[in-house]
Image: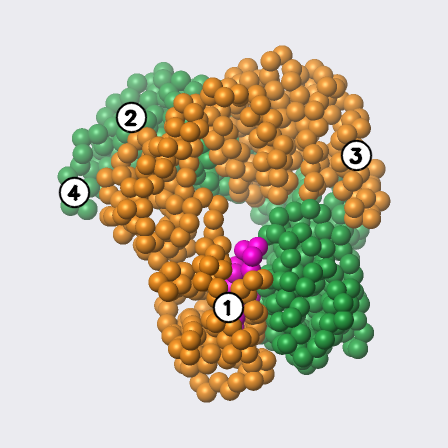
Chain colours: A orange, B green
Amino acid sequence: MKAEIIFTGTELLLGQILNTNAQYLQQTLAALGIDLYFQVTVGDNLERLKEAISQAAKRAGLVIIGGGLGPTEDDLSREALSRAIGVPLEENSKARVITERFFKTRGIAMPSNNLRQAQAPVGSVILDNPVGTAPGLAVENEAVLYVLVPGPPNEFREMVTNQVLPLLREKTGPRATVIKSRVLKLCGISESRVDEMVGPLLHSSNPTLAPTAKFSEIHLRITSKAPDSEKADRMNGEMESKVRDLLGNYIYGSDEETLPEAVGRLLESKNLTLALAEISSGGYLSHMVTSYPGCSGYFKFAVVSGIEGLEELLSVKITGPESAARILAGAVREKAGADIGIALAGGSKTLCPPGSDLTIATSFMEKTLSKKIPVPRSGAAEFRQMAAQLCLVLLWHTLKKM
Amino acid sequence: MKAEIIFTGTELLLGQILNTNAQYLQQTLAALGIDLYFQVTVGDNLERLKEAISQAAKRAGLVIIGGGLGPTEDDLSREALSRAIGVPLEENSKARVITERFFKTRGIAMPSNNLRQAQAPVGSVILDNPVGTAPGLAVENEAVLYVLVPGPPNEFREMVTNQVLPLLREKTGPRATVIKSRVLKLCGISESRVDEMVGPLLHSSNPTLAPTAKFSEIHLRITSKAPDSEKADRMNGEMESKVRDLLGNYIYGSDEETLPEAVGRLLESKNLTLALAEISSGGYLSHMVTSYPGCSGYFKFAVVSGIEGLEELLSVKITGPESAARILAGAVREKAGADIGIALAGGSKTLCPPGSDLTIATSFMEKTLSKKIPVPRSGAAEFRQMAAQLCLVLLWHTLKKM
């Protein structure tokens, strides 16, 4: 099966938005073994959108259009599709239910122009949208399947995963070539060191092995092309074993697993609890740690403040900026009755000081370790992300050895 | 001048790479006032790349091709362009110097396949690449200007900025038009309500006015096309005034300003301080609020925990899940000695309960208000983002009226 993707949105062509939907959909199609030869982006213009649709239909059996399903007059995907395939629009009662439900659950009256969103070419199958007002749709015409998906990334992903993917799986059946990827996630090691260690494996052509660096993590993507899913999984598994033999000590997880999850699982399995004091990271570390669903089992509490606020909350006296992190790590552990106390502080007394250096202190079993970490010049947002990430890396490696 | 962009690379179509080059080039063209109607991505396939080039030449006077200039056999941009325009390739001595220089300065012998990179259609102007092995090129044929730029993002950006931009500025001359945008950011109003209120302004063609929804914010982008920057600014300003007349009460900021910044500025100007108790949002609200650099002036502290942890920390007794948020908002305000206390809680006693409903309580001047908010089905990450966002919207509107 050949596919073509069209994204519509003038903001996309003006470079006002980074098109992350494209990558998400491409990965989904690749995983299904559906070939994608062209992807086209057009502005919110009826004629050009129609032209792109008509051309795609000549080149592909599946045409997916992202965006242009909002309630306003520059949302043109329904109209352009209708004209391109010569099938009129009608009000679709199933689509109307979806749009109306959005307003009902929020207790708001639906403005009349949202009714535009209930329009669909005659014969369409409506795709549910539990997170927005725009129903998606699929319609077949002259052996081409057209699928319309709303543009806001959360709606796009929800619908691609839960509506479009099952639909396409039904269409492709069991005999397609399959491309499958598996990502191994490493922390506490540099990209060039990974490069050195896996060496010749990087030249393998099927499966391929490709490293990318993300903050203080390295992701190694293994991609296999095979006649069926099981074969691809087996090939990926063999490559994974080779990588694990070389780098196993640094691999905290794979695919969708995150470092906070890996840390959370280690805390769970070792039956340890955690408390945090955040000066330098402004709540971002708590946000990361509590993103794992089981967090209420091991997360006692976090306090976010400058030094004064923490002194008050934890009934403790800070003697100097150097010792702040160490004292706070011990104090927060004691106050919470937790096994591990962690504090992130810099050289300043105030909350989230700009461009500050970073000290991470860990208090465990009456012993406190602290580490001053040089953080490269960066913006405030990057600084706290990096601080939280470095703290998780440290915690993961420490827990792993326990 | 009309442009079309083509990106080539199978890894792009497989979704292994997020195409950040696209956005960079789009912004560059927009700033020059060059219209972009289509952008096409194709794989590393000679026929399809040639087809895309030929088609682009029918629709645009400027065709920019990104990627496919490496030394390997699947780097096909030079060959595809040569075939599409019927102009043969030759070894270009200037291009050869660039490729050889890369190896010379590193003291490495040049592999013979890098000689492919010195090939260019007869009559090409070579574009320097000081950071990689791939020279770029520009060639004019039958009134269409073709520009080839290498794909690695650092090489792409370098060449676009220092080679392509001056070239295009020369082409467009001093009478070029400029496209400038300004974004007004609204909260506490639905997209369709915005639509109704600004009504006919949405049909304006220059400036254009385009709404997009992001969580509980609406962004209104005003875009003007004018002969110079000052004129474009003036046109944007006039449209902004009209929008402000209609929707001023909902506009919290513009362009790069964020809602946490707007809330922070209001707290600063009214000389009010804030304390938070987060059950449902796991630290995410603190992270948002403290992202404004001046936060240490108004942010007293935040506590993140389940009900038990908060009872302990704030020395308070929760009588039932219904009243939890109200009691905690008052308690955190008192404990912190803050002017405003805010608590985010759901129907559960544990931290960040999955799929929970949300109650936001605000305690101010001995008065506590609480609001139970129906949150649509969503993932845990979206839930807390939405919770934090809704809380900021509420806070902004409350502070605004004070």
Is B47 drawn above or below residue A391 in the view shown?
Answer: above
At mark 1, the secondary structure is: strand
Q: Mark 3 vs mark 4: give the one in front.
A: 3
For image coordinates 79% across by 32% down, the residue present is: A96
- Chain bearing tag 2 is B
Q: Which residue is mark 2?
A: B73
Check the picture and name the quadrant holding the C terminus of chain B: bottom right
Q: Mark 4 vs mark 2: give the one in front.
A: 2
Specify the segment rendered in magenta. Answer: A273-295
At mark 3, the secondary structure is: helix
The numbered dot on residue B108 is 4
Q: Residue B293: horizontal and vertical position, in percent? A: 56, 68
Query: How far apart are the two marked residues, 2 and 3, measured between alpha carbons?
Result: 53 Å
At mark 2, the secondary structure is: loop
The numbered dot on residue A97 is 3
Q: Type of residue at label 1?
A: Leu
Labels 1 and 3 touching (C-beta < 8 A) = no
